[in-house]
């Protein structure tokens, strides 16, 4: 966003120590990276700094380790190997950077070990933030996915570094989100899925006032079905939020923007697991569900209704799968609606880890206008809440975002 100090407008980088905070938290299975999308998205900022003659240090978290304890399975070593190949040069992994600050040559790139191994990272301890700041001449925040976290490596260091600015990926994501939420081409549609209403209730409340159509799937839709009086059997939902969902539906209807709910769903009698991925499935109308039915996907008629609305959209915001897309028999709803978003003429923004995984699984990433690397930050932005790391950057430049 133009009101933030950015890397392209930062001071001359040659000979300077540049600390890049990125989101390199990629999925690992047996020490192997299963999706490198976040790493690929991080490359432009790395190349910009290295090609500018900077001494480049990369900083990221990986998973949720116990602070102060090294966990080999959450080391960034596989990331260093991937980046070395992508950049055609060795990217060394440095573990003792707090006790022994790295010495780099101009244009050299080094990856600092998982910041969440450091005591005080998530608590945003001032001492740790100052240690990070002492490593660099310029701090670059390029990790939108953790911009909502007031951690030492995000908000803290941004306040204490000599210079602080936003990276190109962060700016691109903010620009796309602003275009989608604050100045959208209408009709504006939000497609929101996922398991829990509780993590998205504030965002849903905000979106219901802004969008022309709020389309729901996943466990979220189940809670709204229950709020509408339907028996949802043994399906995943949140009983304590049924009243809130009912109130939200009533408010949306009063504003002449009623929230459509599924009229058919794909159900099974038994839960799915990785060990037992097969189960008998049935498509049922929502008024026909039995007490032992479990909803795992939207039905074909609901998908057609939603897809028809998406086809007419000017802007689409997509956050969360609408079913258990990891299993083939429950993937059709997410696949079909993801394709509808990708094939529409609308400006489309997809955000969140599961959304990113679904887009990649169904080969949609190149067809969407913008992929946001953030989940929680994406929702917090949609809620209109400030993102601490961005507030810190803006205050450094006496600017607002």
Image: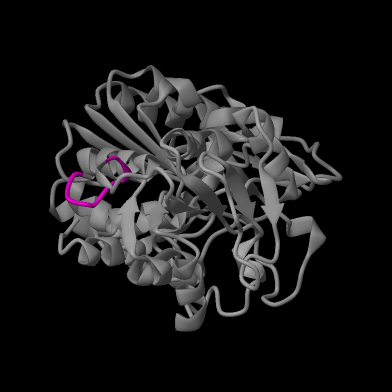
Residue 216 percent across, percent down from the top left: 40, 45
Please give the name of the residue rendered at 29% of the width and 53% of the height, measured from the top-left corner.
Answer: 382
Quarter of the image for residue 169 reads: top left
Q: From this view, report whether residue 223 is shown above or below residue 109.
A: below
* Quadrant location, the C terminus: bottom left
Q: From this view, report whether residue 373 is shown above or below residue 98.
A: above
Please give the name of the residue rendered at 18% of the width and 53% of the height, measured from the top-left corner.
Answer: 209
Q: In this picture, which residue range is highlighted in magenta? A: 2-8
Please give the name of the residue rendered at 27% of the width and 65% of the height, measured from the top-left corner.
Answer: 391
Residue 227 percent across, percent down from the top left: 40, 60
Dominant SS of magenta comes to loop
Q: Is 191 placed left or right of 250 in the picture?
A: right
Q: From this view, report whether residue 155 is shown above or below residue 184.
A: below
Residue 207 percent across, percent down from the top left: 26, 51
Q: From this view, report whether residue 62 is shown above or below residue 313.
A: below
**In the rendered structure, does residue 37 fall within the stretch colored magenta?**
no
Q: Is 302 placed left or right of 267 in the picture?
A: left
| Residue that sits furthest to the right in the current view | 275
């Amino acid at each position: 966003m133009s009101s933030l100090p950015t890397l392209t407008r930062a001071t001359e980088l040659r000979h300077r120590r540049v600390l890049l905070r990125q989101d390199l938290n990629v999925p690992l299975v047996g020490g192997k990276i299963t999706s490198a999308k976040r790493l690929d998205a991080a490359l432009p900022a790395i190349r910009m700094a290295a090609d500018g003659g900077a001494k480049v240090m990369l900083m990221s978290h990986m998973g949720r380790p116990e602070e102060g304890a090294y966990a080999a399975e959450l080391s960034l070593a596989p990331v260093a190997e991937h980046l070395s190949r992508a950049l055609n040069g060795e990217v060394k992994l440095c573990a003792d950077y707090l006790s022994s600050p790295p010495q780099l040559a101009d244009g050299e790139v080094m990856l600092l070990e998982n910041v969440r191994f450091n005591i005080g990272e998530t608590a945003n301890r001032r001492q740790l933030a100052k240690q990070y700041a002492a490593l660099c001449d310029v701090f670059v925040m390029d990790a939108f996915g953790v911009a909502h976290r007031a951690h030492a490596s995000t908000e803290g260091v941004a306040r204490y570094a000599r210079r602080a600015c936003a990276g190109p990926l962060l700016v691109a994501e903010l620009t796309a989100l602003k275009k989608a939420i604050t100045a959208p081409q209408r009709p504006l549609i939000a497609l929101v899925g996922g398991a829990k209403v509780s993590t998205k209730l504030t965002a849903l409340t905000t979106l219901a006032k802004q969008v022309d159509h709020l389309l729901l799937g996943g466990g979220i839709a189940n809670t709204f079905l229950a709020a509408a009086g339907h028996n949802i059997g043994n399906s995943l939902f949140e009983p304590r939020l049924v009243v809130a969902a009912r109130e939200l539906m009533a408010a949306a209807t009063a504003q002449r923007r009623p929230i459509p709910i599924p009229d058919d769903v794909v159900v099974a009698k038994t839960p799915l697991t990785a060990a037992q991925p097969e189960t008998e499935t049935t498509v049922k109308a929502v008024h026909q569900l039995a007490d032992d039915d479990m909803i795992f996907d939207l039905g074909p008629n609901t998908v057609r209704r939603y897809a028809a609305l998406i086809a007419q959209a000017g802007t689409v915001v997509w956050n969360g799968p609408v079913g258990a897309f990891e299993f083939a028999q429950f993937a059709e709803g997410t696949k079909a609606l993801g394709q509808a978003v990708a094939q529409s003429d609308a400006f489309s923004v997809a955000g969140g880890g599961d959304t990113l995984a679904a887009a990649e699984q169904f080969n949609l990433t190149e067809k969407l206008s913008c992929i946001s690397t953030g989940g929680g930050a994406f929702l917090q932005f949609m809620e209109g809440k400030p993102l601490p790391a961005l507030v810190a950057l803006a205050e450094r430049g006496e600017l607002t975002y």
